[in-house]
Image (cartoon, rainbow, N blue to C red):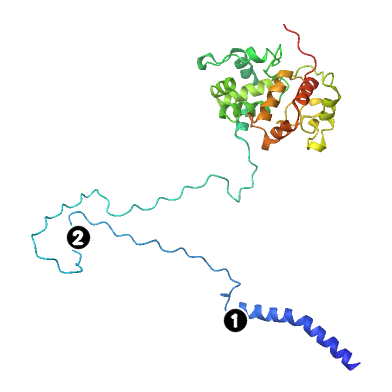
Amino acid sequence: MIEHRKGISVAILLIMAPPLVTLIATAHQMIGTGGDGLIRARAVTASAPPATPSPATPGTPAAPATPATPAAPGPAAAPQAAAPPSAPTASAPPKPATPVPGRSAQDFSASRPEWEKFLRDADPQAGKQLAANGKPAAGVQACVACHGQAGITPTGGIFPNLAGLSSEYLAKQLADFRSGSRVQPLMNTVARALTEQEIGQLAAYYGSLAGPPMHVGEFGGEAARKLDVEGDGTRALPACANCHGLRGMGEGPLLPRLAGQSREYFIDQMNAFRSGSRQNDDVGVMRAFAQRLTAGEIEALAAYYAGPAPKPQ
């Protein structure tokens, strides 16, 4: 019985010994060394820059250097011309480091895109006048020439319908055309001729117009309907409706309406995403999705969202 108790005592002592030793060592390190031991982080001191010789004062002769060996007798050397006062005799001091652009680590405010300020106090009526008349002095034709009187292209084609799109989406696209992050030669030229205020006015005007009539789902077949509503998990393709809304009506200010866009425009843009010639999508999601679709599926989705072709006027 006694031996059993001794065994228990030894086991308890062995269990308690390591924490006690650690506690004693830590206390000694903190108290005995005054806090200058390993627990305290050591300050890193910058090494002193190398000393540079001070420039000589103009007109003051420099002290002669002591030769290592006596000079051999001979004709006196011609006196050297003194360096002009403007000649630098010491290296220039280092330039201060250029600050790295970016936000402070303590700045937790939301980052806002540059184009948002274009929409502040934007006048839709001024945008309507600009859309109807253009900006002839800057070589910008009227927007209605390509996008229709009410933002709906009358004959389809590769010109998008602007009516039904949000002001935010339109302002971002015009800003991207202006900066070159979205490339289309005609629109790049137009956007660069517009001021920030004019971009906001046009976006506010077209964003106030109702979109074209909806005929979603009348064409395109079951394959297009399934891609719109269900997607294809085997190819990591989410349902189009997840981002572009039920029946392609749009979802949020920057996820555009697809309903009513012409077949030609839809196919043109999907192929641009697919080839990488259009790169202004958020983190490349549309480029990735377009590459997973077949050409036939893109054409089926174009017909699904567009509905019947418009009648020539």
Would residue 167 be seen by someone viewing this image from the given angle? no
Residue drawn 69% across and 30% down?
274
Q: Is residue 99 above or below residue 241?
A: below
Which residue corresponds to mark 2?
Answer: 62
The quarter of the displayed image where residue 278 is located: top right
Q: Is residue 114 above or below residue 104?
A: above
Residue found farthest to the top: 313
Query: Which residue is at the front of the view, 196 or 17?
Result: 17
Counting from the top left corner in percent of width and height, residue 35 is at: 58, 75
Density class for disc 2 (Cα within 10 Å; few <14, some 14-19, many ≥20) is: few
Query: Which residue is at the front of the view, 258 or 131?
Result: 258
**How far apart in space, not on screen, are marks 2 and 1 (Cα)?**
57 Å
**Kind of residue indicated by mark 1:** Gly
Would residue 292 be seen by someone viewing this image from the given angle? yes
Q: Which mark is residue 32?
A: 1
Counting from the top left corner in percent of width and height, residue 112 is at: 63, 38
Q: Which mark is residue 157?
A: none
Which of pointers 2 and 1 indicates the residue nearer the eye?
Answer: 2
Query: Which residue is at the front of the view, 130 or 307?
Result: 307
Q: Secondary structure at mark 1?
A: helix
Q: Is residue 62 above or below residue 36?
A: above
Q: Is residue 115 above or below residue 3?
A: above
Q: Which quadrant, please, contains the C terminus?
A: top right
The quarter of the displayed image where residue 8 is located: bottom right
**Kind of residue indicated by mark 2:** Ala
